[in-house]
Image (cartoon, grey):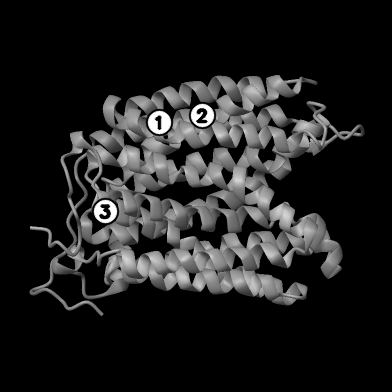
Amino acid sequence: MTPPSSIDPGPSVASGFSRYQKFIIGMLAFLQFGVILDFLLISPLGAVIMPTLAIAPSEFGLIVSAYAFSAAISGLLMAGFADRFDRKKILLFFYVGFVLGTFWCGLAGSFETLLLARIVTGFFGGVIGSVVLAIATDLFPAAMRGRVMGIVQTAFAASQVLGIPIGLYLTTHWNWHVPFLAMAAVGVLGGAAVIWGMRPIDHHLTLRQEHSPWMHFFHTVTEPRYLIAFAITALLTTGGFMLQPFASAYAVNNLKISLEQLPTVYLVTGIFTIFAGPVVGRLSDSLGKFRVFLAGTALSTVIVLIYTHLGPTSLTLLIVVNTLLFLGVFARLIPFQALVTSVPIETQRGSFNAINASLQQLSGGVASVIAGHIVTEGADGKLLNFEWIGYVVITTSLVSIPLLWQLQRGAPARSIPQPAAPLESL
């Protein structure tokens, strides 16, 4: 039986969330908001940071990519140890490191110090998402996880609607250091919520653990069912990161949307997805996660075809297309994340999610590089071969369907080899 310190089951699934569960969902969404905003904010600040620090675009690109690669390495290093501690303590450890790294970014005054600060921030921040997923899996039954993921994923939309405009406002009225200092200050509130509001999440420590963290890592990366989940993650991440880096340039140079109109596109899209995320989550729980994933894939396939073949268009049409595109992405991402939470056994959840998060970072970086070799710039500034990115995105989406079907119908993961007696947590 699960001890009270680990979980508050609250009311039945049909009657909704308990008060403590609502607090946990809100807190996890808040933490995700801060991490995602920290990752996204650096790019729009490039126009200010580069001249201020007197650095070239190539050096700024290194600052941006340093976060992702550091996060990927951190996830792999953590995987063997992720299930050997109370998840609350792991979350608090990495979140404190993330806040300190963000504070360091706000103090950086040179290319070298900002680069180091982004490496530190990525090392700690890149793991938080995987811990959040492990906690959501531990505290909520499978029938509720669609709604949980739907709410938590609104952090991405909220970072676009609230975080980035506020960050740009602070930069315009003061300097580029202020947004990072403000995020660090707000992050202290998140840390306080974890310390005083979250109960220990340590039921997995009552189960038998593998003696060696490295064997724990090995058994996680060699489990056949996990490999299918990792493959789907790579496919979906690759598709998403191929379109995103060129979206602004495509809108301005190909669709003839002015720079002044771009914030409106992201604002309206973000507001819509804030409300759409929880709806998609509820549908995933009521209709079935695989069915909603199929619907999201069908919608995104059609919209990607339309989007990547658009010519000069109106602001209204682009907002509609962009909103439908994000709806399709959310309708795939939310049910997939809710479904994949049931894949790892309890003693491998932390390791599984850490590796999965690391793979997301690596896949995103590789996808951006591949897209950069596909797309070229014409003499008039238009992006050429952009439709080929759409074909790649559609292909990765379609290939993921049979893999997800196999995953959700497959046999349970193998249990880890059991030692003679339970080991004490380190």
Horizontal side of 223 relative to 394 (left or right) equals left
Q: Earlier in the sequence, mark 2 or mark 3?
A: 3
Horizontal side of 46 relative to 388 (left or right) equals right
Report the number of numbered marks.
Answer: 3
Q: Residue at x 50, y 73 (%)?
A: 97
Which amino acid does the dot numbered 2 rest on? Answer: Leu
Q: Is residue 306 visible?
A: yes
The residue singled out by tag 3 in the image is 20
Which disc is residue 333 wearing?
A: none
User: SS of the residue at dot 3?
Assistant: helix
The residue singled out by tag 2 in the image is 327
Which amino acid does the dot numbered 3 rest on? Answer: Tyr
Q: Residue at x 62, y 64 (%)?
A: 182
* Mark pair 2, 1: CA separation: 9 Å
Q: Residue at x 50, y 28 (%)?
A: 328
Q: Is residue 73 visible?
A: no
Q: Position of residue 302 (x, y in %)?
A: 56, 19
For this rendering, which residue is in front, 127 or 360?
127
The residue singled out by tag 1 in the image is 280
Quadrant of residue 399 within the rendered picture: top left
